[in-house]
């Protein structure tokens, strides 16, 4: 669909806000594959200058969500299954590493935040709210990432997680996404028990649940 005509009132949007708004518009289908993106239209829509728009588009291009050629149009990319598989492997490995480093230092408050996030995740799935499920899932996995306090992990995840968004949203829009609730419960229990290896293994498995959707996309 075209860029929405409802204009956001001018306000002070941070660079990350602009990036997130555009990323979410691609993930939820507001901006569809093949759609041309023009700086001026996007700036008017979000009520910002063209500078943060251009910066956001560069980040989205690095993440594989848009395609841009010098002197030519910038468009929303189609789902690249190979790139998504590559991103899935990297993201799974980073979350496994984060859990390994986080388990020894997780606090009771950290574990409670994970439990609450999983409760919101389950409720969102029951309500069929994929966006809320994505947010709750992010909050849950962000706890061990923050506890690990490894800036390299955070930077890699920031680059490659957006590539998985469209596939994650499809999963959380289906009944298959409910299996993640049990995996989250298992992850939290193992973290609470201090079982580093098992917790890391379950963390990796949560990202492998995207594989059936990727198989379907390639006709396997």
Image (cartoon, rainbow, N blue to C red):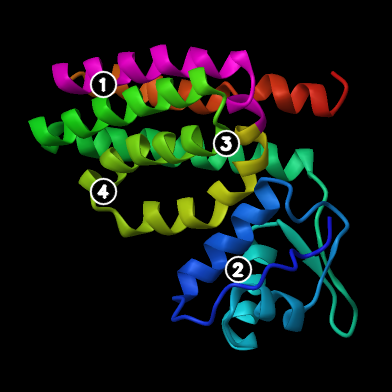
Q: CA distance from mark 2 to mark 1?
A: 32 Å
Give whichever of discs 3 and 4 has the lower sequence position. Answer: 3
Relative to 206, residue 158 above or below: below
User: Residue beneath label 1, please?
Assistant: 188
Relative to 5, residue 181 above or below: above
User: Residue beneath label 4, please?
Assistant: 146
* Mark 1 burial class by Cα count in 10 Å: few <14, some 14-19, many 20+: many
Are circles 3 and 4 on residues that touch, CB within 8 Å?
A: no
**Is 36 included in the stretch rendered in magenta?**
no
Identify the disc placed on residue 59: 2
Are circles 2 and 4 on residues that touch, CB within 8 Å?
A: no
What residue is rendered at 73% in x and 47% in y?
29
Q: CA distance from mark 3 to mark 2?
A: 20 Å
Give whichever of discs 3 and 2 has the lower sequence position. Answer: 2
Instruction: Give the left or right position of residue 173, taking residue 133 as reference.
Output: right
Give whichever of discs 1 and 4 has the lower sequence position. Answer: 4
């Amino acid at each position: 669909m075209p860029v929405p005509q409802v204009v956001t009132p001018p306000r002070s949007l941070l660079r990350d806000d602009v990036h997130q708004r555009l990323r979410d518009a691609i993930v939820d289908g507001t901006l569809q594959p093949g759609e041309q993106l023009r700086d001026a239209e996007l700036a008017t829509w979000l009520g910002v200058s063209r500078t943060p728009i251009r910066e956001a588009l560069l980040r989205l291009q690095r993440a594989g969500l848009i395609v841009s050629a010098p002197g030519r149009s910038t468009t929303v990319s189609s789902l690249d299954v190979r790139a998504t598989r590559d991103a899935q492997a990297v993201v799974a490995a980073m979350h496994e590493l984060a859990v390994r480093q986080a388990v020894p230092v997780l606090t009771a408050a950290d574990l409670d935040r994970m439990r609450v996030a999983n409760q919101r995740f389950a409720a969102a799935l029951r309500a069929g709210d994929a966006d809320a499920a994505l947010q709750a899932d992010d909050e849950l996995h962000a706890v061990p990432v923050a506890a690990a306090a490894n800036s390299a992990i955070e930077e890699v995840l920031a680059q490659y997680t957006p590539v998985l968004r469209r596939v994650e949203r499809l999963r959380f829009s289906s009944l298959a996404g409910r299996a993640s609730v049990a995996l989250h419960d298992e992850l939290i229990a193992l973290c609470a028990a201090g079982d580093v290896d098992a917790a890391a293994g379950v963390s990796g498995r949560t990202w492998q649940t995207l594989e059936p959707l990727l198989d379907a996309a390639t006709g396997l």
